[in-house]
Image (tube, helix red, strand yellow):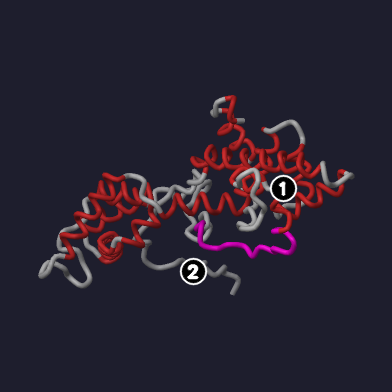
Amino acid sequence: MNAKRKQAMPRGRRRFKSKFASDDAAFDPYNQPRPYGEDWPVINIANRRALLKFFLPVIENLPPDAPLKVVPDVPMNFAQVANWVLGQKQTTLHNAELAEKLHRIQARNDAPGNCHPNWNNREVPPELLHEALSQCAKNAVKDYPVIQRALARLYAVAWFGRNSDSVEAKKQLEKLLPSGRANPITKHIPEIASKFREMRRWIRESNELMKREFPHENDWVEKLAELYAESKEVISAALRPAETPFLTERLHEVLNIPKETIRKALSKLPASQV
């Protein structure tokens, strides 16, 4: 029998489909930006503390006649600084008014005799839920059970609800899901760039201090690389006159963002900052 077997098609239909699920920008929950501020790479201290006399913040914070007795910790490298900055952004609610709203609705649900073990008796309004997750999703979900229960209710109604209730829950979830198009860390490029700019200044000032003690360029570049936990190529690039190409390359390597996106963000900064 030569009849072709029909391809087996999945029965039923998907109960939930995001509006962002297109061929060019499908939402992939496993391919989203990683959380920052939680993992710190192991720092090989080695002899770095002995080089702190060339670290500009240490020199500036000590009295002119004070010996280097109290030794601070070694400086973070560029990747660690970006990781720290983005971690602060993800774990801090900078909007005091929003934080007060969340505290208020959490207190209402925590009141004696007014707290269901699995659901909110006083539900979070959709506008407040969207505002909290768009500004600081990590902090909102981690610190506010009222947000956790609101999301659990939405998912339960979207998957198991009937008729209009399910449709409305799906619409609310679609508004909360990230689009997959815009990288959420791009808005922090200017702040991270200013940190990188300051670190570059430290490297260049440390270079001037090391020139007095080490006679050859290879020697002081090697010591700078050890002090700042970077490769000699990164140190050499920091010592070149052009600043914008250095910032572009560092941000590209550390944040894994296209260079064109970084150039556009840097072009919007005042000329004195780049």
Q: Residues within 10 Å of mark 2 (few under 14, many from 20)?
A: few
Instruction: Say which residue appears at 58% left-offset and 62% top-offset.
Output: 40
- Residue at far right of view: 216
Instruction: Say which residue appears at 58% left-offset and 32% top-offset.
Output: 266
Percent position of residue 117, x then y: 20, 72
Q: Is 211 situated left or right of 107 in this image?
A: right
In space, the residues marked 2 and 1 are separated at their CA atoms by 70 Å
Figure quadrant of the C terminus: top right
Residue type highlighted by circle 2: Ala
Residue 234 visible in the shown view: yes
| Residue 38 falls within the magenta-colored stretch | yes
Residue type highlighted by circle 1: Phe
- Residue at far top of view: 271
For the magenta stretch, what is the residue range?
A: 35-49
Which residue corresponds to mark 2?
A: 8
- Residue at far bottom of view: 1
Instruction: Say which residue appears at 29% left-offset and 64% top-offset.
Output: 152
Q: What element carries label 1?
A: helix
Along the line of sight, which residue is nearer the eye, 38 or 213?
Answer: 213
Question: Residue 206 is drawn in which quadrant?
Answer: top right
Which residue corresponds to mark 1?
A: 54
Figure quadrant of the N terminus: bottom right
Residue 251 visible in the shown view: no
